[in-house]
Image (cartoon, coloured by chain):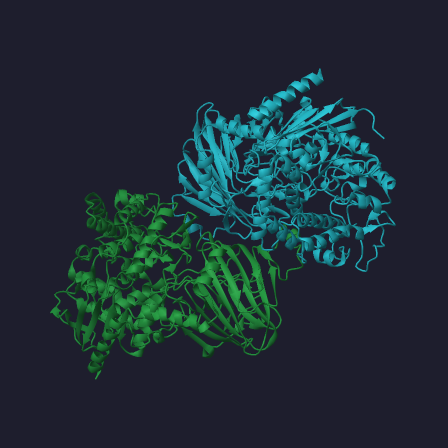
Chain colours: A green, B cyan
Amino acid sequence: MKKILTAIFSAAVSIAAAQNQPSENLVQYVRPIIGTQRMGHVYPGATVPFGMVQLSPETDTASYDLNGHYNPDVYKYCAGYQYDDKTIVGFSHTHFSGTGHSDLGDFLVMPTVGPLKLNPGTADKPGSGYRSAFSHDNEVSAANYYKVKLDASGIIAEMTTTTRVGFHQYTFPKSDNAHIILDLMAGIYNYPDKNLWVYLRRINDSTVAGYRITNGWARTRTLYFAMTFNKPFTQMGYKNFSKREVYGGFWGKFNGVKNFPDVAGRQIKVWFDFKTSQDEKIKIKMALSPVSIEGALNNMQTEAPGWDFDKVKNDGQQQWETELHKIVIEGSKDDKENFYTSMYHAMINPTVYMDADGNYKGLDQGIHHADGFTNYTTFSLWDTHRALHPLFNIIETKRNADIAQSMLAHFDQSPEHMLPIWSNSANENWCMSGFHSVSVLADAIIKGNAPFDANKALDAAITTANHRDYEGIGYFNDMGYIPDEKDGNSVSSTLEYAYDDWCIAQIAKKLNRTADYDTFIKRSQNWKNVFDPKSGFMHPKLADGTFRPTKFDPFTTIGMGFIEGNAWNYTLYVPHDVPGLIKAMGGNKRFVTYVDSLFSYNLPDKYFAETEDITKDGIIGNYVHGNEPSHQIAYMYDWTDKPWKTQDKIRMILKKMYKNTPDGLGGNDDTGQMSAWYIFSALGFYPVAPGSDQYATGSPSVYHAVLNLENGKTFTINTKNQSDKNVYVQKILLNGQVLSGYFISHSDIMNGGEITFVMGPKHKG
Amino acid sequence: MKKILTAIFSAAVSIAAAQNQPSENLVQYVRPIIGTQRMGHVYPGATVPFGMVQLSPETDTASYDLNGHYNPDVYKYCAGYQYDDKTIVGFSHTHFSGTGHSDLGDFLVMPTVGPLKLNPGTADKPGSGYRSAFSHDNEVSAANYYKVKLDASGIIAEMTTTTRVGFHQYTFPKSDNAHIILDLMAGIYNYPDKNLWVYLRRINDSTVAGYRITNGWARTRTLYFAMTFNKPFTQMGYKNFSKREVYGGFWGKFNGVKNFPDVAGRQIKVWFDFKTSQDEKIKIKMALSPVSIEGALNNMQTEAPGWDFDKVKNDGQQQWETELHKIVIEGSKDDKENFYTSMYHAMINPTVYMDADGNYKGLDQGIHHADGFTNYTTFSLWDTHRALHPLFNIIETKRNADIAQSMLAHFDQSPEHMLPIWSNSANENWCMSGFHSVSVLADAIIKGNAPFDANKALDAAITTANHRDYEGIGYFNDMGYIPDEKDGNSVSSTLEYAYDDWCIAQIAKKLNRTADYDTFIKRSQNWKNVFDPKSGFMHPKLADGTFRPTKFDPFTTIGMGFIEGNAWNYTLYVPHDVPGLIKAMGGNKRFVTYVDSLFSYNLPDKYFAETEDITKDGIIGNYVHGNEPSHQIAYMYDWTDKPWKTQDKIRMILKKMYKNTPDGLGGNDDTGQMSAWYIFSALGFYPVAPGSDQYATGSPSVYHAVLNLENGKTFTINTKNQSDKNVYVQKILLNGQVLSGYFISHSDIMNGGEITFVMGPKHKG
């Protein structure tokens, strides 16, 4: 029965894809609420694919409140929403998706009725401020649509977005005392003095505009806005919470603070008053711009000129349909919810970072125009180079090329003359290690997705890799490793630089730049310099060339030379030379035993509190799936005589780490990397070494999938005898031919065709 | 002998003017040091006419120092320099000229040798920081040139400017430990948190650029800079004095703080190290921009591409020569120093506020392009509408029209939809009262100097005058006066609005907009509503229409309804209807007695401490020349039967209030208004009511003057029997015809020709 259905469905999809008429609504399977409980750090609110606006509720924000009270749980509130919370503070327009860092939460809007309260109050006493209790029973979280009932007021809050505009719709009770609060002080991880300055001016009786300058994850960031209501406010007011207003006297020449023409200060809150009839809808459009107030006004006019909430919602959901239909799978409802929520999470970042007219702010603090590409920001590259950008090179080729161009623009504008590390909103924050934008560039160039100047990309990569002052690069280049005395992450950085330099070598090879190839392929072998054959682990090495003699603990993530990982996991981080690693580690058998032990050893509890990003949720044995450095490990059996161990591990990880429940993510989604891992693995293959055109196969969990490629071709994944128990691959047919080995190439996919996994309950060999 | 010389000199000037070859260097008479002692609030440093850069030494700055010590003498340090001080803190690039408000002082540069000190230290212990003792013996202060020897280091500091670039030249001793400190925290009236943010990046080994955002007199102001040295620094470093650097860890990934690629923070100081040989010159160019770093770099390249200090100095001094030659006078060296220093001070403000490419920041916080005009800022209009802009309508017609256009652009961009009050750097600070930009517009339009849309100007003026929410305008328009209960300056604002509305009526009349004329000419008579015939003074009036019965003190500036003036002076402030005022005050005889008493009554000491801007230096009897509301008074005798009283008063004021010594100014120069009063009065006439084409004559102090007009014509002022004692005008000949009465018109001047004042020791009548 299953098989017949599969065949019928498969045919339907193929026809639908050919006619560009999706046969099934896939948005229905997107559940943004997945991962909002515990440490997924995603948000339940509304956004369009790669949108600049992420309009979502805050349940708390790890902020100082007006009474000086501080909620110190910064890590928990990275996305501003925790499923277990009982109150909502308001709805803000910017959110990171799945990061391990708290920031954003700009321009918090909250509708209220009754006496005006400007303090959010505390969660245990929601009546103490403008925050409201809510229930998940009265909450809808969907792609580009969020709805909730605010118990305090009875207001129904709905929101949707365009790329650059947040669209609110609040259904009020009858009230002579209805308010919209715009809290320009609020923010996620809103430490003191994060707000450098706020400016707002009234344009007319229903529109205001302004900006806020913040010092946060983006060191110096100005976000402009324009906010318009569907009906005039009866009055507006502000309160300045700054302790000192030096020239307040002069600025106060207008009658009081009501209906003021403009206001500026460090700590400003603004409110708008309305009289509402029963069930009257107050609608708000909030447009953002990284460039100017004028840019924000123009973005609003361009993207959301009218007041039809449903149209904006539907247009955005149609964008999601288009993106989701790039991979049409067959599976259970649970599978589809996991898969399409993963697709959704994978297509939030990077985010568009330019106005509708193509202007954007650069790292040189100047305004630039994006000629011939869309400029993006929010590059969490230590995470996303692994699987997210490779995924884009299959199903988002145009966008990934634009992302590469954005990186090259970043390089041009960077005061440091470096490609991005972790960049956001025209700022580089240098978070994590390596310089993995070179991996993204290499993967695009090697895979033929480089409608940009590849030689320029190589030059930028080489300049970045030769930035001797940056985090041990000089030592790495001179000595072949980073001495332990010089850097706390000496071993992991040595491993990451080795991989990055291998990526550069791949570009050089493709461009026939032999001297560059020779230099970088040599450096790519530097991982060998930190492998200690005696202990069998990657190990901190001293400047004198000896391994550090102090007690070595392969389980701890602290003080052993690794960033966010232990030696046991990181030792396997040589994605570009797995055969070399196997050899160094003593050959096939020893290697298999080592990887086995990773999954079977139970990490003692004492190690869990060490690193925020590594929680029990994301660990299987001692294998850390919840953080990125191990993401290739389960596929490494493909290089041994036990590829079936990849297959059962993958199916186990898919099941254990991804569930369609609020607590369903095993760790931070990390701007889509965790989700990209899921998508690849569910389809049956994975890019172990981005920059190579090779994918290692695993064990697909889908029953069937069609990849609708931008080049007009389709690549179909078929399975036979697929089931939860039949996790072992018996045979792989590529376009009808039996595949020898366990690897496929990028061109196998992009040329179109089909792959068939014949599954069974027992492993081969 | 005098007469013969005069004739020869006069002929020489005429020929010179015709050939554009000045016969005498006039820059030699400019002594910027005049007014730097006591409360003139001018600065001794370098600037070109109306330049964006004012590069001048700070001797102290009324700031909090790094130890939290605060020098509270804010008013004294408006221009950052006090002649009596013994130490120099450094050289900064922006200064107000003669304001009663402390601000600016951006980008303080100080050269030092020896151990690096980043704290300026205190004046009593100059060795405690980077400040240095200096002597006026080693100081040269000239137009566009300042030089001083810094005793602490032996360094000779020289500076000059272009419109947008400050050019430093420091002659060092031999040193292996020479520094240039760039103190980005320093500022004039540098209260805590004035620095909102500072950003700096290294462009190469001899150039840095960045910006600073401040919250000062301009509420939200970003000033960009580019700074380049004539030789590479050996290294650079920074120190961040902020208490908290949230993400310092990530930003610190580069090796230490030396030669950092960029830095940002609230409280940053930067230094550059050099090795210098004996007498080696380290030169610096610091370009400013209100728009962007790119704008600053372009300004530098456009205006000062090379390193020839003397050429930049000479080019700027040639600009001054051109401006100064617009009025060529004959007189003693003292007279010329007073006159040309006044000309110099009158031609500093307003200041150019746009990049070399025409881009500037607007009050809407957006970037605009000035099409067909030069954009200006620094509008201290309560002061300058009285005589400075009328002076410009004679000798700076093109510039004054550009200033008017800048005001109209201000109106377009103003969130309040108002013309400027006191605006600076794309901000309105609402300082002082009235809306006297309408006077500037009216004066230009009435005098035929309006190459802009006069109807648009009238619309803007009317909109401004009808801004009911603004400081009592609604009451004024409805009730004919501002009730004392509603505004602390109800009387002076009523008087000022009456004059401003008269100005609007004059425009309306010229444009044949009869209804508007009727409205505003009616309002212009509202001064009558606050004149109390019983007391004989302008008097606070209550909402019920009665005069305030509480004790009335005509000498105090506090609590009597006037801003920066007492009733005795302000009662005479009806510049647009002197005959009406005379009538109201009881006719000719009573009026003359009243004005006489103003000059003869000795104001008791107790009144001097009341208002900062009114000091003993600027007072004659009870007549306050040091502040503006009385500036027309001495000319009002021209409307009585005692015009000779104007003549001796003017000569007395010229002598008492203007001296060519450091303490030579009787009060704040107020961005040129005090100087413009001097220039007009020295020439023998004055614009009592700007917006009228009429000038009241006084008693010229010059022996001879030629006005070289932009229309190619010349207007010559001759005197006969002129001397310090012959202050009384016996006869006035206009183009050879005896003038009946004591008034001339604007066209009399602009049509070219000559006026001859026949002087004598005794007054007529």
Taking depth in this image into account, of B422 and A486 the one nearest to the observer is: B422
Q: Residue furthest top?
A: B1
Residue at 70 percent across and 35 percent down: it is: B677
Residue at 38 percent across and 60 percent down: it is: A351
Where, by quadrant of the figure, is residue B11 drawn?
Answer: top right
Taking depth in this image into account, of A426 and A302 the one nearest to the observer is: A302
Quarter of the N terminus of chain B within the rendering: top right
Where, by quadrant of the figure, is residue A51 drawn?
Answer: bottom left
Q: Image check: B283 left or right of B440?
A: left
* Residue A61 visible to the viewer: no
Taking depth in this image into account, of A363 and A695 the one nearest to the observer is: A363
| Vertical position of residue A679 compared to residue B51: above or below | below
Q: Image check: B656 left or right of B412?
A: right
Residue at 20 percent across and 81 percent down: it is: A3
* Residue B385 visible to the viewer: yes
Quarter of the C terminus of chain B within the rendering: top right
Q: Image check: A135 left or right of A719?
A: right
Q: Number of numbered discs present?
A: 0
The x, y position of residue B394, in whole percent, is 64, 35
Taking depth in this image into account, of A122 and A438 the one nearest to the observer is: A438
Q: Residue furthest front?
A: B737
| Vertical position of residue B640 compared to residue A140: above or below | above
The x, y position of residue B328, in whole percent, is 63, 26
The x, y position of residue B525, in whole percent, is 77, 51
The x, y position of residue A16, in whole percent, is 26, 74
| Vertical position of residue B314 compared to residue A244: above or below | above
Where, by quadrant of the figure, is residue A50 drawn?
Answer: bottom left
